[in-house]
């Protein structure tokens, strides 16, 4: 008969109540620890907590103040922005109005513009005529040795050193195209303009003003003659070729200036033709005044050369002075021109050798 296996017994055993007792004990211990910590925290001084609270309240107030300031600044910027936008809108509207007005002016016809320019030129000529008439009236009312009066700018003293004496004075005026300006580029540009624009050239107006001043220096009882020259020489007063005019006749002097003001500079410079006039006059002049801006470019009425060198111009100058009568002083007024560096020394030599005077004219003379 088989023997039953004996069951082995477990020495360690724990009942349900033991487990529950241990669990409750642990809970009670945990509760006591937490309660002790809470009590310790509760017993701390509340002054530190109040300080923190006040600090937070101050920071909140500062934040609210900054928020109010930011809102005010934003409102002010919005107002300024609206004001600036209004100003910009007004300026844009004004610009549009000006553009519309400018467009109306631009739509004027070329004929009207030319008419306005012509009227302006006529007004200038009439004003100059009035000035001459007033000057003539003062001259007739006042006694004195001066035949004509010339008024410069301010109280300028006209100490030029020119020898203006003599009983017979010949004035030679260069009216070639180079008298339109002092630079080659502007001479070419002005040469293609209308005659009214050429007459308004500053250099030519200065030359005419110089002749006006010279005629006011003529001595009573003396005689004069004024020739203008370019490719040919001709008297300023028509019908007076080869004859001397009375300096006492103020009407003739005024007529000569009036003709010069309406004469257009053009063509080349034939100095030989100008000096031949001095040899042709009878009796010979005892004083020559030459108004010129450079050396000659031709020795006849026409030339086939389109370009001329400085050496060739100097040779033309030497041939031209052979036509001058001997013993007559030549007084030279030079209006310097770009690119003609030999002119000053050659004309100074001519003035010195003839016992005359030389002056390089400044832009504000006379």
Image (spheres, grey):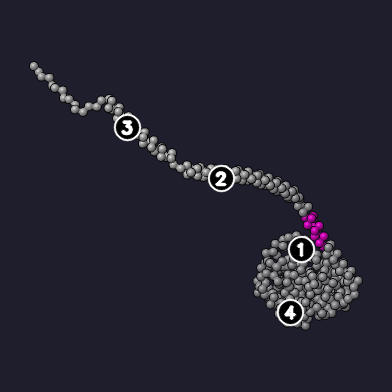
Q: Is residue 268 left or right of residue 147?
A: left
Task: Please tell me which residue is depicted at 73% across the width and 82% down the height of the picture.
Answer: 353
Badge 2 crowding class, 10 Å Cα cut-off, few under 14, some 14 to 19, many 20 or more, is few
Q: Is residue 89 above or below residue 317?
A: above
Mark 3 — residue? 26
- Residue 49's disc is none
Which sits earlier in the primary sequence, circle 1 or circle 4?
A: 1
Q: What x and y, as percent, mark residue 14?
A: 24, 27
Which sits earlier in the primary sequence, circle 1 or circle 2?
A: 2
Instruction: Give the magenta-colored segment's residue range.
Output: 114-125
Which sits earlier in the primary sequence, circle 3 or circle 1?
A: 3
The residues bearing labels 1 and 2 have C-alpha atoms spaced at a distance of 78 Å
Is residue 123 in the magenta section? yes
The residues bearing labels 4 and 2 have C-alpha atoms spaced at a distance of 96 Å
Q: What x and y, as percent, mark residue 122?
A: 82, 60
Badge 3 crowding class, 10 Å Cα cut-off, few under 14, some 14 to 19, many 20 or more, is few
Marks 4 and 2 in Cβ contact (< 8 Å): no
Q: Main secondary structure of the magenta part?
A: helix
Badge 1 crowding class, 10 Å Cα cut-off, few under 14, some 14 to 19, many 20 or more, is some
Task: Please tell me which residue is depicted at 81% across the width and 76% down the height of the picture.
Answer: 170
Disc 4 versus disc 2: nearer the observer: 2
Q: Is residue 277 above or below residue 134?
A: below
Which sits earlier in the primary sequence, circle 3 or circle 4?
A: 3
Is residue 7 in the magenta section? no
Q: How many numbered marks does the figure carry?
A: 4
Which sits earlier in the primary sequence, circle 3 or circle 2?
A: 3
The residues bearing labels 3 and 1 have C-alpha atoms spaced at a distance of 123 Å
- Residue 62's disc is 2
Mark 4 — residue? 351
Disc 3 versus disc 1: nearer the observer: 3
Mark 1 — residue? 200
């Amino acid at each position: 008969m088989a023997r039953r296996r004996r069951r082995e017994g477990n020495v360690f055993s724990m009942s349900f109540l033991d487990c529950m007792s241990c669990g409750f004990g642990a809970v009670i211990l945990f509760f006591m620890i937490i309660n002790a910590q809470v009590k310790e925290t509760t017993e701390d001084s509340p002054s530190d907590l109040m300080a923190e609270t006040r600090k937070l309240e101050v920071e909140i107030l500062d934040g609210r103040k900054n928020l109010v300031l930011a809102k005010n600044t934003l409102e002010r910027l919005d107002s300024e922005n609206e004001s600036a936008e209004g100003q910009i809108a007004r300026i844009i509207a004004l610009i549009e109005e000006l553009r519309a007005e400018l467009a109306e002016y631009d739509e004027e016809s070329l004929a009207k513009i030319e008419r306005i320019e012509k009227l302006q030129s006529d007004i200038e000529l009439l004003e100059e005529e009035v000035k001459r008439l007033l000057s003539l009236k003062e001259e007739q009312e006042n006694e004195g040795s001066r035949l004509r009066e010339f008024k410069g700018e301010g109280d300028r003293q006209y100490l030029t050193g020119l020898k203006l004496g003599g009983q017979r004075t010949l004035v030679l005026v260069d009216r070639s195209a180079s008298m339109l300006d002092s630079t080659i580029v502007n001479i070419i540009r002005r040469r293609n303009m209308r005659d009214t624009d050429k007459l308004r050239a500053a250099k030519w107006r200065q030359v005419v003003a110089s002749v006006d001043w010279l005629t006011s220096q003529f001595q009573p009882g003396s005689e004069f003659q004024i020739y203008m020259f370019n490719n040919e020489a001709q008297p300023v007063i028509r019908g007076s070729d080869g004859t001397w005019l009375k300096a006492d006749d103020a009407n003739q002097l005024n007529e000569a200036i009036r003709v010069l003001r309406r004469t257009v500079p053009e063509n080349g410079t034939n100095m030989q033709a100008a000096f031949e006039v001095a040899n042709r006059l009878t009796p010979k002049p005892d004083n020559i005044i030459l108004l010129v801006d450079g050396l000659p470019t031709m020795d006849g009425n026409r030339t086939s050369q389109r370009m001329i060198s400085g050496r060739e111009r100097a040779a033309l100058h030497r041939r031209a002075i052979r036509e001058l009568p001997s013993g007559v002083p030549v007084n030279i007024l030079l209006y310097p021109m770009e690119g003609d560096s030999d002119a000053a020394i050659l004309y100074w030599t001519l003035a010195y050798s003839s016992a005359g005077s030389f002056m390089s004219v400044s832009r504000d003379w006379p």
